[in-house]
Amino acid sequence: MKLLLASNSEYVIQYGLRLLFKDISEINLAYITTAANASSNRAYVIYTQQAMQKNGYKFSSFDIEKKSPEAIRDFLKDKNVVWVEGGNTFYLLKMVKASGFDKVIVDLVKKEKIVYIGTSAGSYIACPTIEVSTWKRPGEEKSRFGVTDLSALSLVPFLVKAHFKEQDRNLLKEKSKTCKYPVKILRDGQAILAENESYKLVGEKGEIKI
């Protein structure tokens, strides 16, 4: 199976998709926008859609909220890439489980019928849990939309922390000490390329160690 777990969408558009496909004409991408439903500003979704059009990527946008597993499978039947966009991770996880997207996508990815791309929240849900979404400084917490079970898709055996800033270092160091899973930290402009059980940091600069 193959995944690209990125911090931000610019990396995916400029480098990530071309890293996954030598011939971009082969791409038929499902762009999952659901996490943005809980964001006050959806401009990044419009930006990403326009950037994909400009770069010649074939894609169709899709919202999994209130969709059935059958509708999701039908939408994905001719796609070879699914890109789960960022936004509110708790809301996204809630919709992923409510719609059955979790079972559908795990099945397709593990059978190598589709490549999984995540950005920010979309990367978080590919991990065993989304607990890094709770690692916030006071005043930065997001609504959890009633989500108490933080277990996610477990497509990789580690957690991802996106959008690293230097002021986060001490917080991440402290939280990582009691975390059950390894934590891979990404700056914007970085991603993790996962191919079966091989994991490689790609993008700008080196690995962040705390």
Image (cartoon, grey):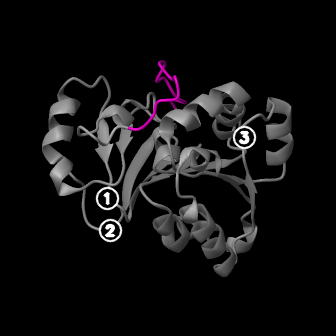
Is the residue marked by circle 3 packed among few (<14), some (14-19), or many (20+) residues within 10 Å?
many
- Of the residues tagged 3 and 1, which is closer to the observer? 3
Is the residue marked by circle 1 packed among few (<14), some (14-19), or many (20+) residues within 10 Å?
many
Cα separation, mark 3 vs mark 2, equals: 32 Å
Q: Nearer the viewer, residue 89 or 52?
A: 89
Q: In the rendered structure, which segment of residues is drawn in magenta?
A: 142-154
The answer to whether 83 is drawn above or below residue 24 in the figure is above
- What secondary structure predominates along the stretch shown in magenta? loop
SS at badge 3: loop
Which residue in the protein does label 3 denote? 64
Picture coordinates of residue 158 (x, y %)?
38, 34
Q: Quadrant of the N terminus?
A: top right
Q: Which mark is residue 131?
A: none
Magenta-span inclusion, residue 152: yes
The answer to whether 59 is drawn above or below residue 160 in the figure is below
The answer to which image quadrant residue 34 occupies is: top right
- Of the residues tagged 3 and 2, which is closer to the observer? 3
Is the residue marked by circle 2 packed among few (<14), some (14-19), or many (20+) residues within 10 Å?
few
Q: Amino acid at mark 2?
A: Glu
Which residue in the protein does label 2 denote? 204
Cα separation, mark 2 vs mark 1, equals: 8 Å
Q: Earlier in the sequence, mark 3 or mark 1?
A: 3
| Relative horizontal placement of residue 74, taking residue 150 as reference (left or right) | right
| Relative horizontal placement of residue 120, taking residue 186 as reference (left or right) | right
- At 28% from the left and 38% from the top, the residue drawn is 136
Which residue in the protein does label 1 denote? 187
Picture coordinates of residue 125 (x, y %)?
51, 37
Q: Farthest residue to the top: give it.
A: 149
